[in-house]
Amino acid sequence: MRTFGSCDAEKILELLEKDLAEFRITNMQTYIVSIVSDRASVMKRLGKNSRLDHQLCHTHGLHLAVCDILYEASVANASIEDCNDEDEDEEIFAESLTTSIVTTNEI
């Protein structure tokens, strides 16, 4: 089930029941054993409101943590590279300035 925009837990439960009804599943407690979701607060509330067993996906949380670490590492490396590039840029600027002065004096 894909939604656009924001939904509260009650609206998500309503949409879930509507989608399951298309498969003639009208009583979730009879046919559904468990719900698995991420750790978002709205999904935690959905688990409580549905009165089903609710499992939180720890793999999703681990994935987000790894992405955060990799992102921070790439930003730190970019900062180090930027510092190295500044030294190189200053050398290039100094060389071009010297060339300009020499060219002006020759005229």
Image (tube, rainbow, N blue to C red):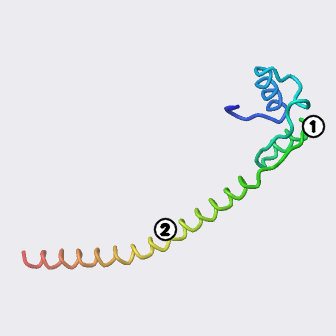
Give me the disc on residue 21.
none
Q: CA distance from mark 1 to mark 2?
A: 48 Å
Which residue does the image show at 34% across and 76% down from the upper left? 88
Which one is closest to the eye, mark 1 or mark 2?
1
Q: Position of residue 89 (x, y in %)?
A: 34, 73
Give me the disc on residue 78.
2
Q: Is residue 91 above or below residue 18?
A: below
Q: Amino acid at mark 2?
A: Ala
Instruction: Please tell me which of labels 1 and 2 falls first in the chain.
Output: 1
Q: Position of residue 103 (x, y in %)?
A: 12, 75
Q: Is residue 46 above or below residue 18?
A: below
Going by the image, does 102 lie left or right of 76? left
Q: Quadrant of the C terminus?
A: bottom left
Give me the disc on residue 51.
1
- For this orientation, the residue located farthest to the left is 107
- Label 2: element kind: helix
The quadrant holding residue 84 is: bottom left
Q: Is residue 49 above or below residue 64?
A: above
